Amino acid sequence: MESYLKSANEYVPVFFSRDPSSWSFANAFLTNKFSKWSHDIKPKIEQNWTMRWPFAHKEITRTDSSYKLACMLRIGGKVLRKLEQHQRSPQVASSALGFGPQMAMQLAERLYTQGFISYPRTESTSYPPSFDFGGTLAAQVKNPTWGTYVHDLLAEGYLKPRLGTDAGDHPPITPVQAATEDMLGNDAWRLYQYVCQHFIGSVSPDCKYVRMKVEFAVGGEAFYCTGQYVTVKGFTSIMPWLEVNEKSLPHFTKGDRIEVSRVELYEGNTAPPDYLSESELISLMEKNGIGTDASIPVHINNICERNFVQVQAGRKLVPTPLGISLIRGYQCIDPDLCLPDIRSFIEQQIALVAKGQADHACVVQHVLEQFELKYCYFVKQIDNMDTLFEAQFSPLADSGRMLSKCGKCLRYMKYISTQPSRLYCSTCEEVYHLPQGGVIKLYKELTCPLDNFELLIFSMPGPEGKSYPLCPYCYNSPPFEGVEILSGSTKGGNASKFGKGAGMPCFLCPHPTCCHSVIAQGVCACPECSGTLVLDPVSAPKWRLYCNTCNCLVFLPEGAHRISTTRERCPDCDSTIIEVDFNKNNTPLADGSTLHMGCILCDELLHSLVEMKHGKSFRMRVSGSRGRGRGKARGGFRGRGRGRLADPKMSFRDF
């Protein structure tokens, strides 16, 4: 079934089976018996002999072994050519290489940026008249796999490709320079290898082969068999996966009578159509005018990430209960949303606008009016969608586990761990979205001073993952105007719009008295960006600071019993003074004491014990002159300052 899910301002295609009528066709499929004859004749032919005319299953009641001779009726042959055909790169990568379309485009873009292939986001199959075929082929002569073939092709003369389609964007994908597997890595090399072989095959001769067909009669029924052999391999020499499957036949003469050694009736059952593979989905999208080489991988990746389908063995796209329920809901309310017609029509109109054959304003106005009408109608019928989902899924109130208290009703909310993870208050009937990709726990039963919600702690995976507290209500509805939010947490990336999944954790909160805000836990300005280094509250015993904007990490003295921020400021750089309680067994203090207060930028002892990690490289602290004045300190660090944007970015070379 071909379906289009309206989400995030786009129609996302979902193809559930080969049959375009309904996904339920596969589940409701009724199997029927079928029969076919199998004969062995002398000399034996290793082929399937097929009946020339169909017959009804009810007419076959027994196998008759009285037929001993087969009479040759007709023998014929035909010389055929197999032509090299263009296929979309994501389609080939999925079917032949086993890559998903999104992965294929990512690999192709990497090869392009490294200068190994031409621009990959193209739909053209026609080369410009000035294209240098000889130079492109010459760059592949030294390749150990196909270099000899390319050398012979240049010597004998290559053939220019047949006229294809000029989509007006970019030329077809071609290799730009030679490469090896060691240079590219396994996956990128396989894709690069296909691009090279496809280009070389496109300028190679056609494959020529002869197909033979033999017909004979047994007991009044006609059967036939075909065989074929290659005369010129042509482009299949460089593209062996497209070579002709040769089948040899013995020599026969019309009228020959040959002994039948075995007659067998095989019975089987018909099977429902299989699910679509990614490559078949791409073909259907192309056939229905949906998407381009640039957008098709994104569409397929979206329906996988949103759990509408799952990629299983053979790159088959199998619908999930969520996807099936969503499609059935669309079919019940507005069947147009399940058909490719809307998206195809819009793309056709866009193409006409590009050609100057349609007015841009009229097209936009018409499409917006249609969407508005469909949206209003859908909202009025939304109860039908709820009914279908309730029949398939358990209510949200019955899911999850108790985690934290709601600040409105003071009752426990349930944590739904399935993606996307969220909190649900069954009393208030409110859903609170949470950060994704980490672990959510209750944070010491502490509460937010603004709304009385219990705080949570979010921990990213891995030894370098950040941990930060958040208030569920503030995270979804930031209480301050103009405050920054987590990058990409709102749809469209607009940080000025709050609401669903807005994303303001405590390290971005500017509340002046909250002990979890950036005012209380911030230490100094980040040396790599305009952010602030904040104390990680649960990083003990490997204490550290993290930037609330970038991936910068600053490791503090390891093994300390406790590290906390204070209300005091450094008089030189205005950074926050921290208090460190060292372990008595390895305290660095000369008198053996364990408690020490100071600025990590200006204090000699603390500055010698910190180190920074950014990305995958460590940069250790080296000695430097003492910084003076407000806003700059030793080692390239900036002081806390009165605002994160007050000081210009400084180098971290001396840290």
Image (spheres, grey):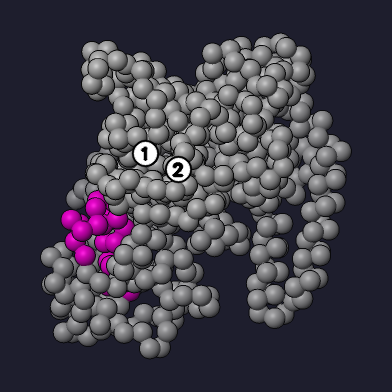
Mark 2: few/some/many CA within 10 Å (<14, 14-19, 20+)? many
Residue 490 place in picture, x, y as percent: 63, 43
Q: Is residue 201 magenta?
A: yes
Would residue 30 be seen by someone viewing this image from the given angle? no
Segment tinted magenta in the rendering: 179-202
Quadrant housing the N terminus: top right
**Going 39% across and 25% down the picture, which residue do you hit?**
597
Pointer 2: what residue? 573
Residue 591 place in picture, x, y as percent: 25, 17
Return the disc, 1 or 2, that comes first in the chain's sequence. Answer: 2
Give whichever of 100, 47 is nearer the camera. Answer: 100
Pointer 1: what residue? 602
Label 1 and label 2: CA atoms lie apart by 8 Å
Q: Secondary structure at mark 1?
A: loop
Give whichever of 331, 173 is nearer the camera. Answer: 173
Q: Main secondary structure of the magenta part?
A: helix
Q: Quadrant of residue 112?
A: bottom left
Residue 125 place in picture, x, y as percent: 44, 74
Numbered mark located on residue 529 in the image? none
**Going 77% across and 65% down the picture, which residue do you hit?**
364
Q: Secondary structure at mark 2?
A: loop
